[in-house]
Image (spheres, helix red, strand yellow):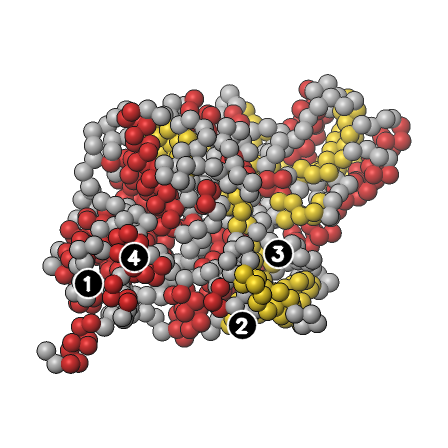
Amino acid sequence: MTETEKKKKTERTPMPEQAPEVRRRNFLEVPTGYTEEMAVSEAQRCLQCKNPGCVKGCPVNVDIPGFIKLIVERKFTESIRHIWATNSLPAVCGRVCPQENQCEGQCILGKKGLPVAIGNLERFVADYEREHGTGALPPKQPPTGKRVAVVGSGPSGLTVAGDLIVKGHDVTVFEAFHKAGGVLVYGIPEFRLPKAIVAQEINFIERLGVKVECNAVAGRTVTLDELFEQGYDAIYVGVGAGLPSFMNIPGENLIGILSANEYLTRANLMKAYKFPEVDTPIPHGKNVVVLGAGNVAMDSARTAMRLGAESVRIVYRRSRAEMPARGAEIHHADEEGIEFMLLTNPVKYLGNEKGRLVGMQCLKMELGEPDASGRRKPIPIAGSEFELACDLCIVAVGAGANPLLTSSTPGLKLNKRGYIIADEETGKTTMKGVWAGGDIVTGAATVILAMGAGRKAADSIHKYLTFGW
Amino acid sequence: MFKIVRREEMSQGNVVLNEIEAPKIAVKAKPGQFVILKANEEGERIPLTMADTDPAKGTITIIYMVVGKSTALFKSLKVGEGFQDVIGPLGKPTHVEKVGTVVCVGGGTGVAVLYPITRAMKQAGNRVVAIIGARNKDLLIMEDLMRAASDELIVCTDDGSYGHHGFVTDKLREVMEREQVNQAVCIGPVPMMKFCSKLTKEYNVPTMVSLNPIMVDGTGMCGGCRVTVGGKTKFGCVDGPEFDGHQVDYDELMMRLQAYCEDEKRCYEHYCTLHDAK
């Protein structure tokens, strides 16, 4: 083997993707996926550690060396089946997990070079199964006669449903929107997670026997007590955070200021980027400002760019090092021409006589001592006010706990911030027969953490249905 | 699908009534609550406050004016056809209690929303004076139902083609002058609610209005329906749709309702062109 060949073999296989100047104006998926050859070559980089760090880094403990070994052997169908044993949404996780902080962050190859592209490989086998698979379902236990209601069809709810249906329980998922998938459908954009893939994942659990009831707003259409009256033996609450945070500064109700929830729901769930072929409109900003620097902020900024904006700026009060978004998302946004105005904080929105946004007044910030979050606290610089012209502002500064369900369920104990109190290991709440997990317990987090909570709760629910509370 | 079992046209086809099969909503809905309807896959989610419910039959009734693409699409649905999605009941129900004399004021299709509230107020033992208005006689709706639901009904038209020639506020003032009014409920176009509230404030009559801001999910998730009430931002969908009429910032609400007016015009024209081509 020559030196170049050796080097090639040890280098991480890059993910092919649409060129930034092309993709910034379309809604097609950015990474186009590995070919078989790329996948096998990348899989060969895995050292098959005896004591693999990657598995410990995964919130649902996927047997990563195991599925990678099967890729090396070109047993792609076996590989996806191996993942399914612990993760029912691999096509989603391969795309949206923050692998750099989880599996890939623990990979031994990462100590000297780049870690194995575990996410890309997971995505590859999931996509391979979707395109070439037989559609065969995993085995199911005989019916137990127990009924489980899952409230919310996001990542944690789908995990619970998928886990419990194969254990023989009768599972119904209740979704408030007209389409199932939760944040996977309304929140994460098409260019990062194609909706056809989410639909396929939901179709998969439906084929396993899970019933999905849309347009069912828990707390309004149906309450938890009524679900018990209807004969459900256990309930899992995974309704998400679902309450947008605003800046609470003057002028916030001007036209042209939207929560990221609203902006992304219009774009993703309602497909408003196709307006007027679909009926839901979405504001098209020329000069767009996105407040916040998490994944939702990146999604909003990149959506605005795709809707034809001349400029899109992320305005964030801390520095680049504190930005909570995944590295890959920041990188993609940067490549697509999103500008980063860091250490900047808006203090006031400016409007015209028609009540439309025309700009905002901002302050420059500097970093002081670490605050409660452990990050250096941004402090305003006196006299640094300046005006920033913009006609659309997306507020992506986090979410709170939506009280719609919890306020109609007095038996559920909440913490000070309105999130449901649930046991960390089992997901058990203070109400008998009710479990909770995902963002309504932890506050806004990631898809995979919600799935991890779902997995633990599903185990606990199964134990309860078999042995009692 | 949520099937339409009864369909009526009023106001020369400008206003349409749909009675829809939605048993789960029908058994839970209370006066003042709304539903979100979506006609088909590409459709928009449209919030409408229910005009009636029939828990025994499992139906809900909505009444809407055709103002754009989505309502035109709703109007095109025949009996036996239906809505792909109906979500509800949403929002807080009207607070109904016996307070004495209640004046219920309705304008345009607001009368449809007002009707179940009027009925509930009377059932709670109140003396109910209802005042309904429209631009002209043809646009007036639900006169007979409102007469039956109240102790006294006063009808107004802007052009004088029927009943009192003038605005509902004229008659509202008259009623408050002649007798002690304990509560007012005003539902209709935003300017009407604004001026009714201004008037009832002069007479210190507690006033409830029902707002219909632009919204997407109707569950408090998007915040598109922000309204300023008493200087604080509220969400129309979960904190409302009813608010203290004396506290609402109507001017802001009117502006926010214009957010998509250009888009809506474009979408409606697009639909009409396609429709005419057919």
- Upstream in the sequence, badge 3 or badge 2? 3
Residue contact at pointers 1 and 3, CB within 8 angstroms: no
| Amino acid residing under circle 1 | Cys
Residue depicted at 44% across the width and 37% down the height: A422
Residue contact at pointers 1 and 2, CB within 8 angstroms: no
Q: Confirm whether circles 4 and 2 share one chain.
A: yes
Picture layout, residue A430 above or below residue A445: above
Residue depicted at 32% across the width and 69% down the height: A17
Crowding near the residue tagged with mark 3, few <14, some 14–19, many ≥20 C-alpha atoms within 10 Å: some
Residue B82 percent coordinates (x, y): 46, 38
Q: Which residue is mark 1?
A: A46
Q: Chain of mark 1?
A: A
Foreground residue among B188 and B165: B188
- Upstream in the sequence, badge 4 or badge 2? 4
Residue A311 is labelled as 2
Q: Is residue B266 left or right of residue B227?
A: left
Q: Quadrant of residue B94?
A: top right
Crowding near the residue tagged with mark 2, few <14, some 14–19, many ≥20 C-alpha atoms within 10 Å: some
Q: Confirm whether circles 3 and 2 share one chain.
A: yes
Mark-to-mark CA distance, 1 and 4: 12 Å
Residue depicted at 20% across the width and 42% down the height: A137
| Amino acid residing under circle 2 | Ser
Foreground residue among A387 and A8: A8
